[in-house]
Image (tube, grey):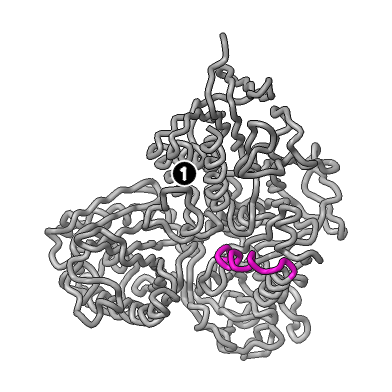
Amino acid sequence: MAEIDHWQPVLRTNELRAAPAAVKLAGRELVVFRDGDGRVRALDDVCPHRGMRLSLGHVEAGNIVCPYHGWAFRGDGTAVVPPARNKHACAGRWDAIERHDLVFVKPSGVTAPFPRLELDGFHHVSTFRREIDAPVELVLDNFIEVEHTPGTHAFLGYANTDDVVTTVRATDDHVWVRNVGPQKPVPRLLRPLANVSTGDEFTDEWTTWFSPVYTVYDHIWRDGSTGALKEHLRSPVFFVPIDEHRTNLFVAVYARRSPYGRLGFNMLSYAAVGLLSRFEVELDVEMVENIADKSTSLAGRKLGHFDTALGKARERIERIYRGQQPR
Amino acid sequence: MSPSRVDNLVVGAGPAGLAVAACLRRRGASFEVLERAAEVGSSWRTHYERLHLHTAASHSHLPYREFPDIYPTYPSRQQIVDYLADYAREFDVRPHFGATVQRASPVGDTWRVETARGDWTAKRLIVATGYNGHPMVPEFDGQAGFAGPIVHSKAYFSGREFAGKRVMVVGSGNSGAEIAVDLFECGATPFICIRGPVHVNARDFMGIPAQVLSLRLSKLPRWVADRIGVAASKMRYPDLEALGIRRPSKGPISMIVEDGRIPMIDIGTIDLIRQGALTVVPGITSFDREGAHFVDGRYVELDAVVLATGYRSGLGDWLETDALDDHGLPRVFGAPAAPGLFFIGFRNPPTGALRDIGQEAQALADHIAKAN
């Protein structure tokens, strides 16, 4: 398995409109478009004729038309003949599918599991994509430790990591982390919106998988005194390399509470939670992009106990995601 | 060895058996529970891994004990397994494990029950063995010559072992529809064989579980409920026919009530069909070594077949009674079906099987408590 040999998201569903979209996945350039049935399709972004970028063309009758000489290709990459003069011309084909409001691709013919997000019964709050100027390892690092939450985050996380109990467990194919501690201060105005208060018991629990690289978070808030469940968000996050230096981060937020709860107030609450999630991710990005030493190796770094999951993730990225033999 | 005596003998330690046991315990009635497996909730333990409850947690728990607050709307298989184990502990239900019932027959005004681990005499026999005891396995022409495995969904746990393979699921019930999704998610190339017309409905509408809506619908006249059911399906799936799935002429609610056939609850199956990730095939005419022929003349190469063709109760195999219908299913619930004979958990109403079990268990326990 190589980096590209997994089902990975490359776009949000509503980023794909009538025009073909150029996307980059682990250094490979693809064109993504909708065919005549509205099905999402993906091909190598290079015309087999003279190497032009198909993404600069347009879609006509469900086929993608190269802007250079007008050769047309179906969603499966085969040429429409005529006008293509060479009936053997075939654009490099990828499998593509829309699920969970994201467009996923993998090279055709490669066997790969589809990421399981366990969203049954959860309600969609928000999905967004953020390009980050840092390699995939460093982005993942940020998202699998809570030590940064007191300083980096506005509302999400813990005030003091001394009060946090962290458990890390790893199996061959995943890394699981649970943190439990008091929620950091929440401004009075946000409390009803987020349904979270200062001092609630906040459990930040997640599992990271490596084919592809993604983490499914459970953010659970319980009343500090009664222990009653107040809020539960489930949030799958995908870490997809654009190339060696940049990463596409896909964040989806789902809630356990139905949007109709609290007489429909939850809908307003959802909007707020969606915006807050985006804001908190921006704060993460601010830090990650400003890292001075963006080498991906952990060798030589002085790590603390909150970084336990990082090393385990590194090993699994190399072995499972990149398919490298352990050195 | 003379048989052990007990007032109330419950057969089966799944949700139905445990619910009855809990209700009897609350009423101070004495009982024993027989279970053929080595643990409670054995069907749920061996169901395929991806399974979730199709009905809402808030409307599906057993008597006296809600699901833990952290359980989502549709609890997972493992969560149900854990819940049942906790439930048995809480109500101190300790079944006799490994006690497969070989024969149960009325003797005078008692029931005589022979098991693999001793015999019983009971005043009342409460049968809670479930409607999915025995797999129904159809036979197809040429299937003996098919090179790949043909397994029943009862033996299917995960699609992982089928990664990279071309696998056909036979049957369009909820197991078939979900196993097809599981196969795709595990990296197989799935096909689903839909032989006859089938109703399809979403599991929820705008975030409201279909079961909760069914509870409302069930109060309406059946023809009205049927029309609403079909209209809802047509709104959500206007392209069903184009995907190779025909709707039955009989309404969905009537089919549940009259024929015990529940609609396919869509957990993503239809979307995979639309996107070409799952291929619908019609009835099978025959198998050969490499694949199968279909009634529309198509031929598909296959590596394996999963039969999601349902179950039969298997009651007729061991239970000596004339209280069963042509399908081998009981007709009377919440009251004696024959002197000293009760059934629970053999229905699958639109409002949810677990919810129904809870109500039946209470009615049944009331009946028994009054008789004492």
**Is B76 situated left or right of A225 in this image?**
right
Asked if B119 appears above or below A212 in the picture, the reply is above
From the viewer's side, name the closer residue of B154 and A327. Answer: B154
Residue at figure coordinates x 27%, y 51% from the top left:
A168
Where does the magenta region start and end? Answer: B210-223
Residue at figure coordinates x 48%, y 77% from the top left:
A11
Residue at figure coordinates x 73%, y 50% from the top left:
B302
**Is B179 situated left or right of A1 in this image?**
right
Chain at numbered mark 1: B
The kind of secondary structure the magenta stretch mainly shows is helix
So how many labels did they put on this image? 1
How far across and how far down the image is residue B113, in percent?
62, 22
Asked if B68 appears above or below A4 in the picture, the reply is above
How far across and how far down the image is residue B190, in percent?
66, 56
Residue under label 1: B81
From the viewer's side, name the closer residue of B95 and B265. Answer: B95
Asked if B218 appears above or below B87 in the picture, the reply is below
